[in-house]
Amino acid sequence: MSEPIVEFRHITKRFPGIVANDDVSLSIMKGEIFAVLGENGAGKSTLVSMLFGMYEPDGGEIWVRGKKEHISSPRYADSLSIGMVHQHFRLVSNYTVAENIVLGLEPVRKLFGIIPYVDMKKANRDIAELSERYGLKVNPEDVIEDLNVATRQRVEILKMLYREAEILIFDEPTAVLTPQEIESFLKILEGLRAGGKTIILITHKLREIKAVADRCAIMNRGKLISVLDVKTASTDEMAKMMVGHDISFTTERKPAHFGDVVLDVQNLTVRNHAGFEAVKSVSFQIHAGEVFAVAGVSGNGQNELADSIAGLVKPSGGKVILNGHDITDSSVREHIQAGVAYIPEDRHNVGLVLDFTLRGNFPLRLYDTPKYSRKSLINYAEFTAQSEKLTAAYDIRSARGGETIAREMSGGNQQKAIIAREIDMKTPLIIFMQPTRGLDAGAVMNIHKHIVAERDRGAAVLLISLDLDEIFDCADTVAVIYSGSINKISPASEITTDETGLYMMGVKTA
Amino acid sequence: MRKFTLSCLAIIISLIFGALILWLMGKDPVAAYMNLLQGSGLMEKAKYAARQNMFTDFMSFIDALTPMIFASLAVALALKGGFFNIGVSGQMLFAGFCAHMAAMFIPSKIVVVIVGFIGGALIGALIGWLKCRFNVNEVVSSIMLNSILMYLITFYINTFYVNPVSRQSKAISEAARLTLSRFRWEGLRIDIALAFPLAIIMALLLHWFIQRTTYGYEIKASGLSPQAAYYAGMNVQRTALMTMTLSGALAGLAGVSYFCGYLASIQPGVVPSMGFDAIAVSLLGGNNPLGCVLASFLITVISKGSIYMSSSQNIEQEIASLITAFILTFAACSAIFAKKGRK
């Protein structure tokens, strides 16, 4: 930990309309875990993407191992022994672990000395050895699609190690992991550091930085605010620098006053596209004025649960009863009319028509009601009025107001627009599916306030999230879904985060 | 507005390229381009045959323009709804054929229009149904239908309905034809396209339908993002069916104004190329119904005027197709630019 291995010197990168990095200079030492902390849009991903050759800087220089480098492609970064694990894994899902890892660098043998073929036996052997050496447990012959997220991440790490990367970049690596998986991931990082690797960790989770990082750069709005020694800096200090002002980590809320049962789910069973039972005989009730939060690891039936209650997917069994009316087999339109607001997980493909204007997106779910159209004729004045009302009330920022194409807006503002639209429907039931994924701390706080405000209005709120901090920030009741079944329902005050984590892993069942 | 600028740019660049090629061939590009305008009745020719003048040329131009407007509207509507209707040609042919048959029994212009509308709509609906019911890609089904319909109709015409002299189908009766052919007026003989006002009305109506009605909102939403449309409570399949049916109906109107108007008979064994040109026209018009009218005007000037250009300058008529092809290429490029510019 003496000489700098990577140096950014006065790096500036502009995208149309924004300066993503503004004169950023920092150096990263060999063999350290260097964290880059910042909100979404602070420019941290852009900065390291330039090191990996995905973008080129508009100004400034990048030095690697004391040499000025012009990193024009990921392939060139590869030749400098720089590897990156992206937020969304880049694996071929129907290939085996070993096939994925050797892809592009396959050990080749020649049949009869002429016909080349991939020596998978050698590949499997090499990878087993590599996984042994770094304590990354994988079976080289498993097929990727059968593996869970944490294992896939290990495969991504092995992929870098197989390429003999010395500088390892991780982009938001723990976003998809459970608390227990995060623990073991952080151990892996420490193991890699002990093996002499340099690690660059992009994250906005302070706890992880505190746990493993040596030094930490804090970015805000494209500028480097400070580089801190993690041992001596406090979490509060780092958080303050990250957002640029003080933030409180918990949403203030009044005690809940439960009313009557609004949503009654009875033995709900939902099959996914493959015909597999993704939700298995789930039952629960949500009262007026209650935030009912469902925790769980990704892919345990959350999507199917939310979609079926919102009417997008027909359940194969059980009942969904809203205020005493059976809406199990109703159409999407009938669900909207009955009073189910839904913030879907996929805001790009489902929640918005991205190529519509913002103004055109607000009436998306109610365009057929007398407010927006009479006898099939659209009332554009009402479209505009609604757009002006919601953009002001929810502080939705965009370049050209209601005329902005939704695609051009930032993720946070897109999500705000969806939430504004759904909340404004003032329904008895509102479903939030992963409402803050990929959003920065400021936006998250704002959305949590809205969730609690909906509860205080007397709505029944179903919150489904992978983020335990979010669950405990908002929930009155916590449920845990594992492998399609709800295996725990408890008042939020009577369960801890760690305990919830155990239920999420299916280690504990009620 | 941005789209309009880009379309204009595509046209200008194409004309420059065309001029360059004409110049390399040793022809005078300015004279050639003037011939295009003259052939379309937009500029005075040096001399005219008996009973003809610039006005009669212009009216013939309108006669050729009418089916092109309908055909490009058919493509534009389908594209709005997320479908690539490459089968406008087949729908035109089928509608034209049905109208010919109907006109044998009831020689009436109204019947021709109605039968054409319904005939095209049926084929459009079939494509839409195949898409909704069996998820058959509309490009595949519509291009297959082009061939199926063409061979069936060719078989029928050659067997039962052929004019042995011209080797085309028999001509439709003048009572049913949508073009008043060689109409005498002020000592001139004019071709009057009776369906032209209908084409303009359709363009305006379609514009209004897409912009102002909830159906238009549904078509656009389903076309841009079927998942979001479904989430919005729209019946995406019904919308798809409606879009393709209407698109087919517009293609049907193109078919009758072409085979029962501009032409009086159907040539067996050939799919009208207008259905494919219409794709270029629609792209150039930015998939906007009013833009389609302007783009149809321009493309028809080039194709219709090229006949005169080839006779007066001894330039191959294919040059016109070449310029049209340039326009299509640049229009397609500009669509990409428009997307990039936004990002």
Image (cartoon, coloured by chain):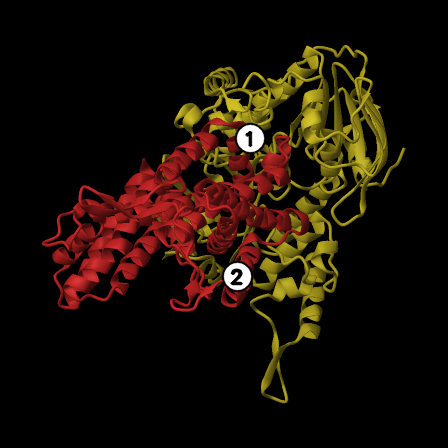
Chain colours: A yellow, B red
What amino acid is found at the position of numbered circle 2 in the picture? Ile
Q: Secondary structure at mark 1?
A: loop
Q: Position of residue A310 (x, y in %)?
A: 71, 29
For residue A136, say whether it is visible.
Answer: no
Please state the chain letter of the residue tagged with numbered disc 2 in the rendered image: B
Residue beneath the point at 55% across and 43% down: B245
Q: Position of residue A161 (x, y in %)?
A: 60, 60
Name the image quarter holding residue A129: bottom right
Q: Is residue A429 above or below residue A105?
A: above
User: Is the Cβ of the residue at disc 1 closer than 8 Å to that at disc 2?
Assistant: no
Give the residue at mark 2.
B153
Residue beneath the point at 24% across and 58% down: B306
Question: Is B55 positioned to the left or the right of A407 in the image?
Answer: left
Kindly indicate whether the residues beneath marks 1 and 2 are on one polypeptide chain.
no
> Of the residues tagged 1 and 2, which is closer to the observer?
2
What amino acid is found at the position of numbered circle 1 in the picture? Ala
The one of B17 and A419 positioned closer to us in this rendering? B17
Q: Position of residue A332 (x, y in %)?
A: 69, 30
The one of B39 and B77 positioned closer to us in this rendering? B39
On residue B91, which mark appears? none
Task: Looking at this view, name the residue that lies furthest to the bottom.
Answer: A112
Question: Is A500 positioned to the left or the right of B237 in the image?
Answer: right
Give the residue at mark 1.
A233
Question: Is B306 positioned to the left or the right of A505 in the image?
Answer: left
**Label 1 to label 2: alpha-carbon separation:** 83 Å
Q: Secondary structure at mark 2?
A: helix
Q: Residues within 10 Å of mark 2 (few under 14, many from 20)?
A: many
Task: Looking at this view, name the residue that lies furthest to the left.
Answer: B46
Q: Is residue B165 above or below residue A501?
A: below
